[in-house]
Image (cartoon, helix red, strand yellow):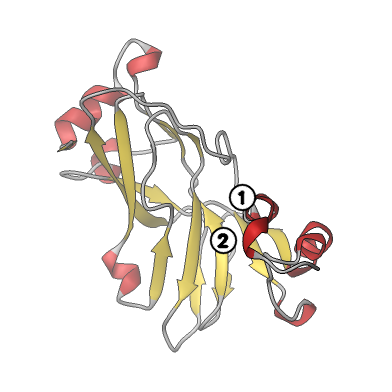
Amino acid sequence: MSLLLKDEIIDLLDKPAIQKRLVITPILDRDEQIGASSVDVRLGNEFIIFRKVMFPAIDIGNHESIRTEQLKYQERLRINFKEPFVFHPNDLILGCTFEYIALPKSIGAYLKGRSTWARMGLIVSAPTKIDPFFHGCLTLELHNAGDAPLVLYPGVPIAQLVFHRSTTEAEYKGHYNCATGPQYPRVLSLSEKNKFWFSER
């Protein structure tokens, strides 16, 4: 695998053949958003928040509880552009990238939080890797690890995408393809696939 630099990223964005093209949309200003070896992505305006008072615990071993009660402890919220979202210490929320991305079959990526936000206590994480041929907005796990509330604004740069080229082609086969907002965790699928490890309920 090799890290892609700015000129290579731009070349992929401009590929005539759609199958070979890297898609990141919208990019409002290439000079500002594309760095020496990464592309800035911005915070979308949809979030999934956790209702702490509504549930005692998330138990993937309790299959029926997961099936019927997941929406009781998670709620989708939309914040308009130019409106603040106050993010309190120790809270965990799911956000998403404003950009929709589509990777060619020979390009993978990693998403990294921006150091400016990290120095204020905001931890931004996502899947450890983004497989080739993934399409969609990326769900972001956001954690305020600081001592003060943070005010987030949709549209503000929140993380960076770092790309690498593989020597062969692959194709994403996960559950979260073609998402246009933050995705609820597939807890029911996790529960069903691991029944062997749970006691009878």
Instruction: Specify whether residue 78 is in view.
Output: no
Badge 1 amino acid: Gln
Q: Which residue was labeled with disc 2? A: 94
**Looking at the image, is 65 positioned above or below residue 161?**
below
x, y percent for residue 80? 63, 55
**Looking at the image, is 45 positioned above or below residue 197?**
above
**Quadrant including the C terminus:** bottom right
Label 1: state its secondary structure: loop
Q: Which residue is drawn at 29% across and 16% down?
A: 15
Q: Residue at x 26, y 39 (%)?
A: 163
Q: Which residue was labeled with disc 1? A: 183
- CB under 8 Å between discs 2 and 1: yes
Instruction: Specify whether residue 144 is in view.
Output: yes
x, y percent for residue 43? 48, 54
Badge 2 amino acid: Leu
Give left or right: position of 131 versus 62: left
Q: Residue at x 30, y 30 (%)?
A: 107
Q: In which quarter of the image is residue 87?
A: bottom right
x, y percent for residue 70? 76, 62
Q: Characterize the local packing of mark 1: few (<14), some (14-19) or many (20 or more) Cα atoms within 10 angstroms.
A: many
Q: Quadrant of residue 108?
A: top left
**Quadrant including the N terminus:** top left
Q: How far apart are marks 2 and 1 (CA)?
A: 8 Å
Label 2: state its secondary structure: strand
Give left or right: position of 1 versus 178: left
x, y percent for residue 156? 43, 56
Q: Which residue is drawn at 74% across and 69% down?
A: 73
Query: How many numbered tags mark residues here?
Result: 2
Q: Nearer the viewer, residue 153 or 198?
A: 198
- Give the residue at the far top of this rendering: 17
* Mark nearer the N terminus (2 vs 1): 2
